[in-house]
Image: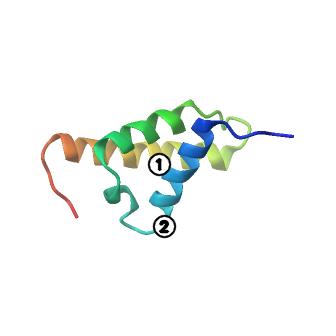
Amino acid sequence: MFEFTKEDHERIELLEIVSSSKTGLKMLSQEQLERLYRLVESRNYSKNFEAEKSKKDLLEKINNRLYDLDEGRVIL
């Protein structure tokens, strides 16, 4: 049986926030976004094409949001 690690629980919790609404990424702090980026990036979805594509799309959205925060753009 598969057991969830602490990182799995953290990743799931952050992904639930992101998927809860259209503005989910905007609800997370910069630290949370950076942590989510690392957690999602480290997961291997290579056996599932759709999951791998979703992972790349999410990483791109997170990266864009981090860029906006770094540049001082406040987009709500």
Tell whether 74 sits left or right of 61.
left
In the image, residue 20 lies at what x, y percent? Answer: 48, 67
Closer to the eye: label 1 or 2: 2
Instruction: Name the outermost residue toward the top.
Output: 42
Check the picture and name the quadrant holding the N terminus. top right
Residue found at x 50% / y 42%: 56
Q: Which mark is residue 6?
A: none
The residue wearing badge 1 is: 58
Structural distance between the alpha carbons of marks 1 and 2: 14 Å
Residue found at x 37% / y 56%: 25
Element marked by disc 1: helix
Q: Quadrant of residue 31?
A: top left
- The reply to whether the C-beta atoms of the residues labelled 1 and 2 are less than 8 Å apart is no
Q: Residues within 10 Å of mark 2 (few under 14, many from 20)?
A: few
The residue wearing badge 2 is: 20
In the image, residue 38 lies at what x, y percent? Answer: 46, 33
Q: Front-most of 18 and 71?
A: 18
Instruction: Name the outermost residue toward the right.
Output: 1
Instruction: Name the outermost residue toward the front.
Output: 6
Type of the residue with mark 2: Ser
Element marked by disc 2: loop
Tally the marks.
Answer: 2
Q: Residues within 10 Å of mark 1 (few under 14, many from 20)?
A: some
In the image, residue 58 lies at what x, y percent? Answer: 47, 48
Residue found at x 68% / y 44%: 49
Which of marks 2 and 1 precedes in the sequence? 2
Type of the residue with mark 1: Leu
Instruction: Name the outermost residue toward the bottom.
Output: 21
In the image, residue 76 lies at what x, y percent? Answer: 22, 64
Q: Front-most of 57 and 62?
A: 62
